[in-house]
Image (tube, rainbow, N blue to C red):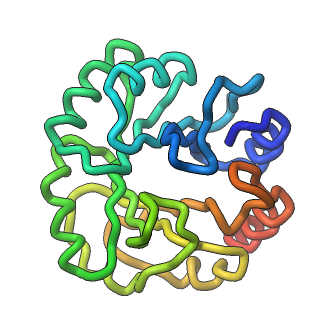
Amino acid sequence: MRDPENIRAVEALGIDIMGFIFWPGSGRYVSCLPDYLPQDCRRAGVFVDADPDAILAAVESFRLDYIQFHGKETSAQMAAVRDRARAVNPAIRIIRSLSVADAEDLCRAAAYEEVCDVFLFDTKGRLPGGNGQQFDWSVLEQYDGRKPFLLSGGIGPDDAERIKAFSAPGFIGIDLNSRFETAPGLKDVAALETFIEKLRQ
């Protein structure tokens, strides 16, 4: 998210968290502070093997509530950044993204449990995220971790009933991205509104 009016419109839908992508390789890269930041939802910054100083600068300037690690960061690296970020926001929380194709991939979550608050399970693809493809959600029925997770990866406007029927240990929410865009970084507000209404029915 980076367009001020688009940010306002999406925020008005009553979402919980809005993401800002700080990976320069993404078409959704946020290169500067938008003229408006959401006030009524939490803010997550998405980073891919970023310099810790750059992460801390974004935490401060964007007043981030979450740091989402989407690269090859180790648990020790994540903990070091988290501890520094707490000087800026003592309530900062950590999201660890993991690419999932099968149950074996879920085993990697255990290495991050002590440092993260929430996992985000995404589809394995060419890019660290935003590939627009789904994985087999039934794999997540085998998740036995202690931390909750968000479901990500190619969720689109036609998936509301699937989401409502989905159940797995620790499942607390969904990540909506590329299939709800009119252009990279610009959300289709009408499609989001319709989808959210279906979920709440």
At a point 23% along the width and 80% down the height, the residue shown is 103
Q: Is residue 59 above or below residue 107?
A: above
At a point 27% along the width and 82% down the height, the residue shown is 102
Q: Quadrant of residue 88?
A: top left
Instruction: Where is residue 25? Give x, y as percent.
Output: 51, 47
Quarter placement of the C terminus: bottom right
At a point 46% along the width and 67% down the height, the residue shown is 151
Quarter placement of the N terminus: top right
Q: Quadrant of residue 105?
A: bottom left
Horizontally, residue 192 falls left or right of residue 137, namely: right
Q: Quadrant of residue 159?
A: bottom right
Horizontally, residue 124 falls left or right of residue 15, namely: left
Instruction: Where is residue 117? Give x, y as percent.
Output: 31, 45
Horizontally, residue 186 falls left or right of residue 76, namely: right
Instruction: Where is residue 38? Give x, y as percent.
Output: 69, 32
Q: Is residue 132 above or below residue 58?
A: below
User: For this rendering, which residue is in front, 81 or 173?
Assistant: 81
Q: Residue furthest top?
A: 87
User: For this rendering, which residue is in front, 189 or 56?
Assistant: 56
Q: Is residue 196 above or below residue 54?
A: below
Q: How many marks?
A: 0
At a point 49% along the width and 24% down the height, the residue shown is 58
Instruction: Where is residue 183? Give x, y as percent.
Output: 76, 57
